[in-house]
Amino acid sequence: MKQWYQELFENYAVQYDKEVFTQGTVGECDFIQEEIGRDKGIKILDIGCGTGRHSIELAKRGYEVVGIDLSESQLKKAKEKASNLSNLRVAFEQRDARETHFINEFDLAIMICEGGFPLMETDEMNFSILKNGANALKPNGKFIFTTLNGLFPLFHSVKDFLSSQAKDGNATYDDHSFDLMTFRDTNTILIKDDSGEEKELKCNERYYVPSEITWLLKSLNFKQIDIFGAKLGAFSRNHKLTTEDYEMLVIAKK
């Protein structure tokens, strides 16, 4: 049986690129570029690359990038977008991030905008994505990713926040239920896919608190772990994480 995230991304590539949460690509890549010291010699893995927005933007800046994703539809759009540009060192591969594919191959791994993690149905699956991201890195490699901030739903309504961010034509969310024991939010998402068909999906997403992320990454032998508030299109080490941040930005170094 297909999981909700598989159904969501079956035919949702064009519409996905119009969603509010995908509009910060350039600013996010500015931050990533600063974090790697603008070193064009490094190789980057983009986990859950989707339509390739970060992969392509970084490749346009001269970096070598491999983007992986579970969705054939998203990857098709990524390849389409990349084919319209010349001299890009970017490759897109259909892979499941829960499985090991790379060992000590990359200088940097990125996973922006819930690139698989934390959408999985079990904590073990989510952890396997982190583990395989860590495995893909060379010694001294860096992992930059965003994830849902578990402090946010303790103080705010997730439903009200998502409703306030939505624009006409974007996905809408309803029937939220946040479980304090598991830190999972179940909700109903209504989208219109690229063929105009409306889909109603039952979603289940895992929120994490900073101490959990720190512990998980330490268990994967990351030596330095920094966590900040993730501002759309404006990642910065100056944004201290608060209960107002829907997402957190994690920067870990081996």
Image (cartoon, grey):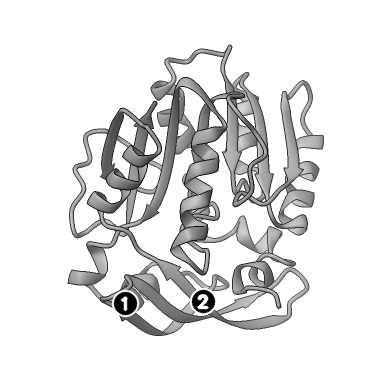
Are the two marked residues, 2 and 1, in contact with CB atoms closer than 8 angstroms? no
Q: Report whether 133 appears left or right of 51.
A: left
Q: Residue at x 52, y 51 (%)?
A: 128
Report whether 201 appears left or right of 238: right
Task: Report the front residue among 38 and 84.
Answer: 38
Instruction: Give the image quarter of residue 205.
Output: bottom left
Assign the N terminus to one quadrant of the image: bottom right
How far across and how far down the image is residue 33, in percent?
46, 24
Q: Nearer the viewer, residue 121 or 53?
A: 121
Q: Which residue is mark 2?
A: 203
Q: Position of residue 143 (x, y in %)?
A: 44, 34
Amino acid identity at mark 2: Cys
Q: Give the mark, 2 or 1, whose residue is nearer the N terminus.
A: 1
238 vs 61: above or below = below
Let me know if residue 229 appears in the view. Answer: no
Q: Secondary structure at mark 1?
A: helix
Q: Quadrant of residue 253?
A: top left
Q: Amino acid at mark 1?
A: Asp
Q: Percent x, y for residue 167?
A: 48, 69
Q: Residue at x 59, y 33 (%)?
A: 45
Q: Residue at x 58, y 28 (%)?
A: 44
Is label 2 or label 1 in front? 2
**On screen, 73 above or below 145?**
below
Residue 188 showing in the rendered view? yes
Q: CA distance from mark 2 to mark 1?
A: 17 Å
Q: Which mark is residue 160?
A: 1
Q: Secondary structure at mark 2?
A: strand
